[in-house]
Image (cartoon, rainbow, N blue to C red):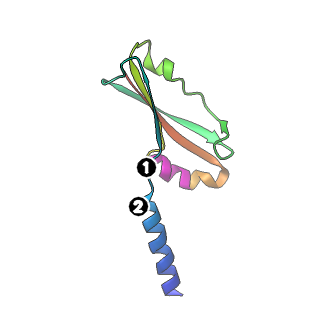
Amino acid sequence: MKKKASLLFAGILIAASLSSCMSLTHTVGSGGLGEAETKRQWYVLWGLVPLNDVDSKEMAAGAQNYTVKSSITPLDFIINIFTGIITVYSQTVEVKK
């Protein structure tokens, strides 16, 4: 019994340490290198229905050149472990001006 529990724990530890963070990057104009603004996008029903509206154009505040990066960060991964039980997931949206 102890051996099974320790193998399960080791498997979970290995899976968590090998998990990667997914990201999608869009460049508008020549891209942004300066200050960044970050917001969290929430989804329900396994990511099918957005709960809030994160507008990257609004976050850019009229900048002509900016970069939008949508990603599941390590913090999102940890949050999703607990909120995934009720099918709520998050991702981070970052806009660099």
Q: From this view, report whether residue 51 is shown above or below residue 84.
A: above
Percent from the top left, x then y, of residue 14? 43, 67
Q: Pointer 1: what residue?
A: 74
Measuring 61% from the left and 31% from the top, which residue is drawn there?
52
Residue furthest to the left in view is 34
Q: How many marks can you see?
A: 2
Which badge, 2 or 1, comes first in the chain's sequence? 2
Give amino acid for label 2: Ser
Q: Pointer 2: what residue?
A: 17
Q: Which residues are magenta?
A: 75-81
In the image: residue 44, left or right of residue 2: right
Quadrant of the drawing holding the C terminus = top left
Element under disc 2: helix
Q: Main secondary structure of the magenta part?
A: helix
Q: From this view, report whether residue 97 is shown above or below residue 40.
A: above
Is 28 covered by the magenta stretch? no
Percent from the top left, x then y, of residue 51? 64, 35
How far is disc 2 from disc 1 in space, using C-alphas?
10 Å
Give amino acid for label 1: Pro
